[in-house]
Image (cartoon, grey):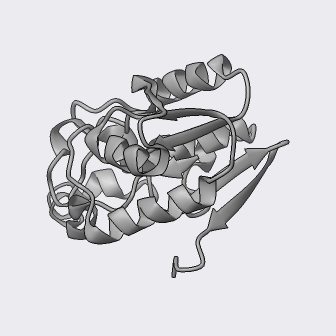
Amino acid sequence: MMRHGETLWNVEGRLQGRGDSPLSDRGIRQAGWLAHLTRGIDGFRVSSPLGRADQTARIVFGDRFRHDARLSEICVGEFAGHLERDLRGRHPDLFRGGDLAWYDCCPGGEGFAALEVRCRAFLMDLTGPTLVVTHGITLRMLRCLALGQAPAHLAHGVIHQGGIHVIRNGAETVMRHVDDV
């Protein structure tokens, strides 16, 4: 599983959710690292249809992949496009519940229960080795489910842009490019 490369909104600290921003120069390099790391790995190739994931997948896979809307990022509703630091100032109560708990409270957002349902459905449909390009929170949910962990573990661990999170036999390893510092 791979997270899309860094975007201009990532750099700004702006929430994307289902919104979109193009890859930054670093994000394009990260996608190139992913292409290098996945070279020679067989499997079904699939990506979120959102622009930043699609842009990453085109660099990684060329035209040999499919889109699956279930891999889209969690919807952050009315928070999309806003700077996280501004939202923390305007809605301090929503940000008191832990590192990622606020994603479950976004006005007009999707919430973790709905994200879990679509991620679980995606995983249940897999029939063999699969290379996935998705988003930070969605990748966290997929990882928890694939490792047999409760969604309460979403905040555990780091999700690397430019790295591959390999889930195999109930364990996770992370592959990173030598230039990924």
Q: Residue at x 67, y 62 (%)?
A: 174
Q: Is residue 52 above or below residue 70?
A: below
Q: Residue at x 16, y 39 (%)?
A: 78
Q: Can residue 12 be seen here?
A: yes
Residue 28 coordinates in the image, percent (x, y):
34, 63
- Which of these two is toward me, 65 or 173? 65
Residue 83 coordinates in the image, percent (x, y):
17, 60
Q: Is residue 99 above or below residue 58?
A: below
- Which of these two is toward me, 118 or 68? 68
Q: Is residue 115 above or below residue 13?
A: above
Total labels drawn: 0
Residue 46 coordinates in the image, percent (x, y):
50, 32
Residue 174 shown left or right of residue 63 in the figure:
right
Q: Residue at x 22, y 35 (%)?
A: 77
- Which of these two is toward me, 62 or 126? 62
Residue 131 coordinates in the image, percent (x, y):
60, 40
Q: Can residue 156 be seen here?
A: no
Q: Is residue 86 above or below residue 77?
A: below
Residue 110 shown left or right of residue 174 in the figure:
left
Q: Residue at x 45, y 62 (%)?
A: 32
